Amino acid sequence: MSRPLKVVLRREEIDRRIAELAAAISRDYDGCEPVLIGVLKGCFVFMSDLVRKLDIPVEVEFIRLSSYGPARTTSGRVKLTHGIGTPLRGRHVLVVEDIVDTGLTIRFVLDYLRRKRPASIKACTLFDKPSRRLVEIRPDYVGFTIPDKFVVGYGLDCDEKWRHLPDLCELEE
């Protein structure tokens, strides 16, 4: 596990931006109790930090999908491996993602959740890589727009490794 890493964003920058996102989300959902739906596994670090910074009550749920496997590029096929049981009809829903790149995963999640007839549905991602989009999608809340580099840390992995890093790092060849 001794591949070279280059820090892209330090934990302090990430923490400040999450506080800003939490303030915007708290304002937008004031008076509501939205359901935050995290996309596992990558979202768990971001979502836990985000939830602790919110000034509103929320309900938390998780969904698990598969599209990568051990590869560094998406297979292009998204498969639901764990759905949600919480009724969403008439509820406000905020999907929380670690990273949006091709857009295939978030598009799949939004389509899946829309069938549950929520009152509203929005998407929040900590890291956005629009240069890799294969489908048109624009998250409602974006922490950082990052270049087309393979990144790990802060919950993001490569073959289940590197999630523990507190900074966002580029995994160099």
Image (tube, rainbow, N blue to C red):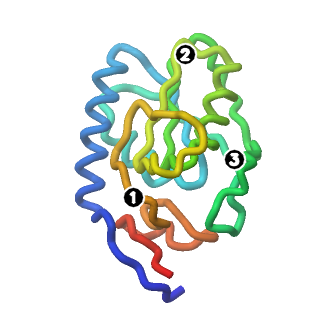
- Residue tagged by mark 2? 91
Q: For residue 5, which numbered disc appears in the image?
A: none
User: Dot 1: what SS?
Assistant: loop
Q: Residue at x 57, y 73 (%)?
A: 161
Asked if labels 3 and 2 touch by Cβ distance under 8 angstroms, the answer is: no
| Residue at 52% over, 34% down | 137
Q: Which amino acid type is shown beneath numbered disc 1?
A: Pro
Q: Is residue 36 above or below residue 92?
A: below
Query: What residue is pinned by disc 3?
Result: 65
Q: Please rate how many residues cluster around mark 3, counting C-alpha atoms within 10 Å: few if below 14, some from 14 to 19, many from 20.
A: some
Tag 1 residue? 147
Mark 2 vs mark 1: in front: 1
CA distance separating discs 2 and 3: 22 Å
- Compare marks 2 and 1 and give the one earlier in the sequence: 2
Identify the residue shown where x is 26% and y is 32%. 23
Q: Position of residue 60 (x, y in %)?
A: 53, 35
Q: Which image quadrant is residue 58 in?
A: top left
Which label's residue is closer to the chain start, 2 or 3?
Answer: 3
Q: Amino acid at mark 2?
A: Arg
Left or right, 63 with respect to 45, comes to: right
Residue sitting at the far bottom: 2
Please state the horizontal and vertical placement of residue 67, each as a whole percent of the image: 70, 53
Give the alpha-carbon distance from disc 2 to disc 1, as whole Å: 34 Å
Using the image as rendered, state which of residue 108 and residue 163 is in the foreground.
108
Helix, strand or loop at label 2? It is loop
In front: mark 3 or mark 1? 1
Residue 173's place in the image compared with 169, above or below, is: below
